[in-house]
Image (cartoon, rainbow, N blue to C red):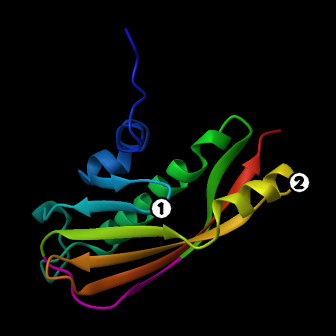
Amino acid sequence: MSETMPSIGEMLTASVPMVRTLNLEFVETSAERAVLRLPDQPDYHNHIQGPHAGAMFTLAESASGAIVLSAFGDQLARAVPLAVRAEIGYRKVAKGVITATAELERPIADVVAELDAGGRPEFSVRVEITREDGAVSGEMSITWTLRPNA
């Protein structure tokens, strides 16, 4: 009998209450990219009946967290990933279902090499938020670090 490890989506859903609250859907999670979807939910609409800016931020930040765990999950015994700063730009009005796609902006090997050398590496994740028609409604850049365990 073999045990299967929970997926990144299952782990984040179990451990991050906002992921459950917003009913985020994990479409794809890998070390190359993470794709999450926010269903259209009237409880999380803003004054123009689109997803609230805070919900969009949470979607994008969650996508960045998913790729970080996928890329650096094998480092968790010696370092904890932490978001350091984030910037988001809202480009077009979002309506309906929106999707966030995250990609690392630094090679995984470079980040791990810095950690191996005793550093506390920082790296950026770029996230694009799109509407169902493919239009980009937002973009986020979030900087993460791997803080070595004491």
Amino acid bearing label 1: Glu
The residue at the far top in this view is 1
Which circle, 2 or 1, is nearer the viewer? 1
Give the image location of residue 114, x and y in percent: 81, 59
Q: Is residue 138 left or right of residue 32?
A: left
Q: Which badge, 2 or 1, is on the more N-terminal residue?
A: 1
Amino acid bearing label 2: Ala
Q: Is residue 5 left or right of residue 35?
A: right
**In the image, residue 88 lies in the stretch drawn in magenta:** yes
Q: Look at the numbered disc 1 and give the secondary structure of its residue.
A: loop
Q: Look at the numbered disc 2 and give the secondary structure of its residue.
A: loop
Q: Which residue is mark 2?
A: 117
Q: Residue at x 38, y 38 (%)?
A: 7
Q: Residue at x 33, y 69 (%)?
A: 100
Image mark for residue 32: 1
Q: Residue at x 48, y 69 (%)?
A: 103
How packed mark 2 is, by other alpha carbons closer than 10 Å (few <14, some 14-19, many 20 or more), is: few
